[in-house]
Image (cartoon, helix red, strand yellow):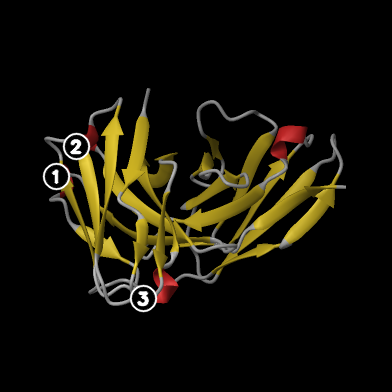
Amino acid sequence: DIQMTQSPSSLSASVGDRVTITCRASQSISSYLNWYQQKPGKAPKFLIYAASSLQSGVPSRFSGSGSGTDFTLTISSLQPEDFATYYCQQSYNTPWTFGQGTKVEIK
Amino acid sequence: EVQLVESGGGLVQPGRSLRLSCTASGFTFGDYAISWVRQAPGKGLEWVGFIRSKAYRGTTEYAASVKGRFTISRDDSKSIAYLQMNSLKTEDTAVYYCTRDLHISGYYGMDVWGQGTTVTVSS
């Protein structure tokens, strides 16, 4: 199975900050990498697919990059509604696997 | 409105069975693969498995942790997917989500999620 490792596990940031979350795969997954946002008590929300393609309706302050084994999710200017947990997920092969999550908290 | 609604969760004893349903609306259900994802209390997301669309023969794939115990099926005439869970273990306790699997230019992503249904396995 492909292991997905996110860093950091949590971070504290202020509104307006630029935030970067890293996701590393245990083997090359090309660009088969998705990002999700989850708020407490809610279902995850699909943000980015194919490593860098923004899902329809997702604000442009979110962006993704990377290929192979190393990927990043960047929030260019953190907004109050962005405080949540973020997960990466590979769809290169089954079983699909998620990172352990990165919790973005208010500083 | 595109929507998925899970049902069938509850409290069940270890070793028993439970069947979850995922009812879709607002899109052509038969055109999409459907996944099940679970989240144990206070933990991260775990993919359980998926069923492909009939265009891809409706085949299934499962995580190792549930293979042989869980079965995913679908009834496209009713726009419902099912997760049959047998031989349940305490570690199967989780919120179970069904998702629509978007397929864009060869890339898959889970673009629509249900609200989740809670399964508690306990004696």
x, y percentage for residue B14? Answer: 33, 76
Q: Is residue B15 visible?
A: yes
Q: Residue at x 78, y 49 (%)?
A: A105
- Amino acid carrying mark 3 in the image: Lys
Q: Is residue A94 visible?
A: no
Circles 1, 3 touching at the beta carbon (< 8 Å)? no
Q: Earlier in the sequence, mark 1 or mark 3?
A: 1
B84 relative position to A99: left or right: left
Indicate which disc residue B30 carries. Answer: 2
| Screen quadrant of the N terminus of chain A | bottom left
**Is there one chain holding both mark 2 and mark 3?**
yes
What's the chain of the residue with tag 1?
A: B
Label 1: which residue?
B54
The residue most toward the front is: B123
The one nearer the camera, B8 or B85, is: B8
Label 3: which residue?
B89
x, y percentage for residue B51? Answer: 24, 53
**Image depth: mark 2 or mark 3 in front:** 3
Indicate which disc residue A12 carries. Answer: none
- Amino acid carrying mark 2 in the image: Gly
What's the chain of the residue with tag 2?
A: B
Q: CA distance from mark 2 to mark 3?
A: 31 Å
What's the chain of the residue with tag 3?
A: B
Q: Residue at x 85, y 34 (%)?
A: A16
Q: CA distance from mark 1 to mark 2?
A: 7 Å
| Circle 1 crowding by C-alpha within 10 Å: few under 14, some 14–19, many from 20 | some
Q: Residue at x 27, y 38 (%)?
A: B23
The one nearer the camera, B94 or B71, is: B94
| Label 1 SS | helix
Circles 1, 2 touching at the beta carbon (< 8 Å)? yes
